[in-house]
Amino acid sequence: MCTMEEIMAPVDTSSLSAEERQKVIAALENDRYVWRTIPGIMKDTGLPEEVVKSALWDDAVNAIASSYRDDKDRELFTTRRHYQKKRSLGWRVLGAIAGKMA
């Protein structure tokens, strides 16, 4: 299993195709999920692990990593846009309250 540092280490993303980027974005923004694992993204896209990891680093994908892990201790990812769309009203209220308290 990779560490977050290994997954998110700077990567040359110039070799990613627009189609690969779009496949990863579509997997990350699948309405059935809020957060995705690398194996889940690989399954949905048919892309190899190295390409998925590169796409997660790519600015055009705009991926974010959760501070939590799944029940198998794997990192979780989504896009900023999908996170904003899917997070619950309760989390938004708590975030607003926490922002005012900081």
Image (cartoon, rainbow, N blue to C red):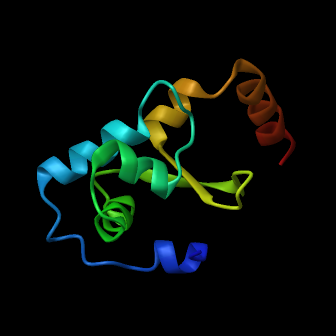
Position of 78 compared to 90: left or right? Answer: left
Vertical relation: 16 (above or below) 4: above
The quarter of the picture where the N terminus appears is bottom right
**Position in image of residue 92 (x %, y %):** 71, 27
Q: How many marks?
A: 0
Image point 44% across, 35% down: which residue? 81
Residue occupying image coordinates x 56% and y 79%: 5
Position of residue 102 relative to residue 51, above or below, is above
Name the residue located 69 percent from the left edge and 51 percent from the top edge: 70
Q: Name which residue lies at 32% across and 51% down.
A: 61
- Percent position of residue 29, x then y: 41, 34
Residue 64 higher or lower than 87, as above or below: below
Vertical order, 49 against 38 (above or below): below
Residue 86 percent across, percent down from the top left: 57, 26
Residue found at the far right of this picture: 101
Work out whether residue 72 or residue 66 is closer to the camera in this orientation and state it: 72
